[in-house]
Amino acid sequence: MMEGSKVSDIMKDLNIQVNPNDFIPATEEEKEYMVQMRPSTTAFKDGMRRLRKNKVAMVSFYIILIITLSAVFVPMFWPYKYEAMLGMQPGKAVDATFNNLKPFEYSASELALKEQGQKVVPHIFGTDSAGRDYFIRVVYGTRISLAVGFFASIIVLVIGLLVGSVSGYAGGKVDMIIMRIVDIIYSLPDMLMVILLASVLKMTLASKLEGTPLAKIGSNIISLFIIFALLYWVSMARLVRGQILSLREQEYVLAAQAAGAKGGWVIRKHLLPNCVSVIVISTALQIPSAIFTESYLSFLGLGVNAPMPSLGSLASDALNGLSSYPYRLVIPAIVISLIVLSLNLFGDGLRDAFDPKLNS
Amino acid sequence: MNPKTLKYILKRVVLAIFTIWVVITLTFFIMHAVPGGPFVGEKAVTPQVQKAMEAKYGLDKPLFRQYLTYLNDVCHLRFGPSLKQRGRMVIDIIGDGLKTSAKLGVIAAAIATALGVILGSFAALRRNTILDRIIMVITTAFVSMPSFIMGSLLLVAFAVRTHIFPANGSTAAGLVLPIITLMLYPMSYITRLTRSSMLDVLGQDYIRTAKAKGVSRTNIIFKHALKNALIPVITYLGPELAYITTGSLVVEQIFAVPGIGRAFVNSITNRDYTLIMGTTIVLATFIVIMNLVSDIMYKVVDPRINLE
């Protein structure tokens, strides 16, 4: 009781003005008002919401979608084939009027067909010097470039993930050895090594692949994948290792280990799911860099095997007739730049949306 | 210099030397994996002549012996004769090419760095204005464009269509377009880098302190902000030179510049193995050293940076 009276004395001295009305229990209406109206959300939904708000990223996404869909579906119904030389038909004399058509021009035989009232699908981008429809070649080249970019990134992802997580989780000597190898590969001048490997693999692989199903893909694309598997996994491995190193110290990992979980289980169930956003983002950003490399190699004549087109080889071929047919260079150039630009912008958008920490 | 920095530098130098050794070893074994060997494609020779030629170039010795000889030769810059250009040594071809390429590369790197820093600081100081937006949009577009595409487009626009510049890069005027092609990417990259680091620095407390003290705007920008904002740019100098070096491979091809890049690309199409090896080693060594220098400079310039 002594204590209580002392407190009230102090209160009097301090002269605190307390309004008793502030302490009335809230009515049901007021409680309703304070309740969070938004339904609870997962990290994924939250990221998607942020991504959808990002106009630049969404526009880039739709551009990629349109390009990809047309690269996949247009060759299915387009009447011309990418490798078909239209002037050369079996049993007929070579029709040179098909060669080097300007956009929307027709060859002599096509004009005759039109005279008879038949419909002829126009050559939107004209034809090339061998009489092949240029539009379908660009579409097919886009397909090849996108496929190469996609699969190369998957290869990089798988190897980087494997090496990085083992290195990060194992630590100690294993980690040190792997990281020194990574350091060396990382400091190799990549483009030079790529050119060197591509020029050699091109020669060694061609004979070995003959007769196998892989021959259809072409020795050059296979060697491109080998190059990515050899050289480009290092930054992914570094990234994954860094993530795992920081996550490894978390309490829930200790708890799992205390409960008897083995290394592989901890990596798969606890560590990888937590660094998935970082991994997805850097894989997305890997695709444009792979497309870049492929087009660069194709431009040097080390890319896809003829007559298969890729955007780089189309641009490279166009250099020969540059003064008469500059659009043959400009068209693949615009497509490559558009793909790389939108993939980069979309990747940035993904990063901002799903990993806000990374940006700040 | 404190011992930690010294240890870091030593570690990086050792790594660089090791990397160069890996490059040399790789080129040796890769070239040996090529089917046929260097004399395939020559006129049909009798087995005796083939044997004699192999003996002359030491190809009959065991592989490891050949490798040691090769290592020794490379260290003395003896890359042997070119297999396709009769009577010319690889080192001479590289030396001739380097004169032109170095001119091209140094000018491109200097302009790219200077313009990038100026544009980047400008964009940062005028943040969120129309000018800033325009600079950012243009640099984003340039960063996404492969150098060979940029070069080809410039060739169409300024040489083929309008004849403002010659399409052939063997004259001084002909070097203008290749230089522009090579500098656009690094310039755009440096612009973006400088802008973001400048914005970061301008938000620091010491800038506010300087403003409060009444330091003039020019002094704040040049003495306080820019000095610190340029530190990240230093790290990019190594990759920039590497980019220009590899970029020049195709750019020299497009504009027919008689440089080391064109020699390299031609050696690939001709399968001139000794020239491929020599050029790869010289260019790779250059890139590794440039990266080393820029990394070390970065750590030395800014003592705050954690050396781990």
Image (tube, coloured by chain):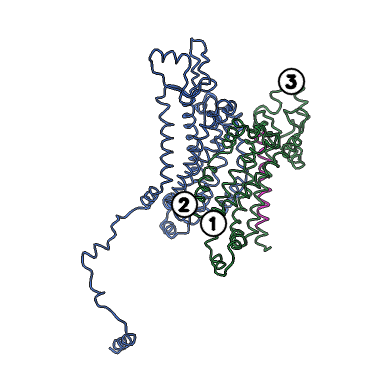
Task: Using the image, determine if residue B216 lies above or below residue A262.
Answer: below
Instruction: Say which of A324 and A100 sits in front.
Output: A324
Depth check: give the residue in front, A153 or A91: A91
Q: Is residue B67 magenta?
A: no
Give coordinates of residue B150: x percent, y percent. Answer: 57, 37
Q: Chain of mark 1?
A: B
Chain depicted in blue: A
Chain displayed in green: B
Q: Main secondary structure of the magenta part?
A: helix
| Mark 3 touches mark 2? (CB < 8 Å) | no
Name the amino acid type tagged 3: Val
Label 3 Cα crowd, 10 Å radius (few <14 / some 14-19 / many 20+)? few
At 53% from the left and 36% from the top, the residue drawn is A225
* Total marks in image: 3
Does any portion of residue A266 appear in the rendered image?
A: no
Between residues A33 and A277, which one lies in front from this camera angle? A33
Judge whether residue B220 can be spotted in this image. yes
Q: Write down the residue under mark 3.
A: B45
Which residue range is magenta in the image?
B8-31
Q: Residues within 10 Å of mark 2 (few under 14, many from 20)?
A: few
The dot on residue B125 is 1
- Distance from disc 1 to disc 3, alpha carbons, whole Å, reads 71 Å
Q: Return the residue at label 2.
A: A263
Q: Nearer the viewer, mark 3 or mark 2?
A: 3
